[in-house]
Amino acid sequence: MAPTTTDDVLVALDRIVERAKQEGDRTGYFAALYHAVTVRVKEGIERGFFDDGPLMESLDAAFAVRYLDALEAWRRGGRLTRSWEVTFEAATRRRPIVLQHLLVAINAHINLDLGIAAARVSPGQALASLRRDFDRINEILASMVLEVRRNLGSVSPWIGFLDRVGGARGDVLINFSVRVARREAWRFAERLAPIPPDRQATLIRNRDLEVAELAGRVLHPGALSSGLLVIRLREGRNVSGNIDALRHVEPPRLEEVEARMGDEVA
């Protein structure tokens, strides 16, 4: 049965994380991050952080179902979007660093799934009223990525080497997950919202290919690849331990999220 509440989503993510730990499955990296983000979203709903709590719970569930269905399809050898296929294929390989595994999953989930979920729960003209809360849920996830990068030392001791060897090029690994992804996800939702779901397939397919191409650039960033290999050689090889480390990264407080949004407006 598909999740309909944040509690349902948390239960589903817990199962994925535990299975990933047992099997040494790197898909558990994103599931651990996603669980922490969902805990904060649940808190926001309960504390009245969002303008429309019930609608945000619907969005959170619809958003999560996109990921949960994609992972289940991957495990069963079924059909799934190309952007998630690229992500899960990468999880079978050791060469990408932990940060890359996280970012390609976030890429698929924000740049493709979020716009679809938003258009489904707030179709047509109703979408406009979702904008502020849409930005809030994005900011929670984007802020979590920054926290993860700051706290990856126990998993990836040489992650700071990325800044030294990458310079401006290193930003390609994180920039899409912050402002650019949020803006583009909203634009995608605006394109979908006026169209009945049974007529959205072509738009979704085209967007999926674009998102998959971006995933390829994150996984294979040209001249930066040799530096990433150095980082990878120093990363922890215990997938279960890495997942546990990610689960202990504290999500940003809601007050910090709101402040960051205010700074962007200013």
Image (spheres, rainbow, N blue to C red):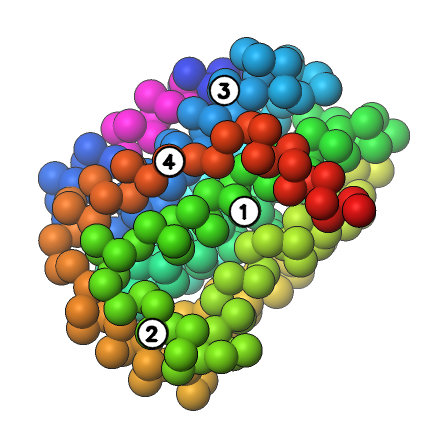
Does residue 68 show up?
A: no
Q: Where is residue 252 shown, x and y percent of the image?
A: 48, 36
Whichever of callouts 3 and 1 sits on the residue coming sooner in the sequence is 3
Q: CA distance from mark 1 to mark 2?
A: 22 Å
Nearer to us in this view, 5 or 50: 50
Residue 250's label in the rendered image is: 4
Q: Main secondary structure of the magenta part?
A: helix
Residue 15: within the magenta?
yes
Crowding near the residue tagged with mark 4, few <14, some 14–19, many ≥20 C-alpha atoms within 10 Å: some
Helix, strand or loop for disc 3: helix
Going 26% across and 56% down the picture, which residue do you hit?
A: 153
**Callout 2: helix, strand or loop?**
helix
CA–CA distance in space, label 2 to label 4: 23 Å
Q: Is residue 143 left or right of residue 28?
A: right
Other residues around mark 3 within 10 Å, as few (<14) / some (14–19) / many (≥20)? some
Amino acid identity at mark 1: Ala
The span shown in magenta is: 8-16
Q: Is residue 176 visible?
A: yes
Query: Which mark is drawn over residue 243?
Result: none
Sequence order check, earlier mark of 1 and 2: 1
> Pointer 1: what residue?
142
Q: Amino acid at mark 4?
A: Glu
Placement of 123 over or under 101, stated as above or below: above
Residue for badge 3:
42
What amino acid type should be assigned to the residue bearing mark 2? Phe
Between the C-alphas of marks 4 and 3, the distance is 15 Å
Q: Residue at x 33, y 21 (%)?
A: 11
Image check: 22 left or right of 53? Answer: left
Residue 101, given in percent of the width and then of the height, sits at: 36, 58
Name which residue type carries label 3: Lys
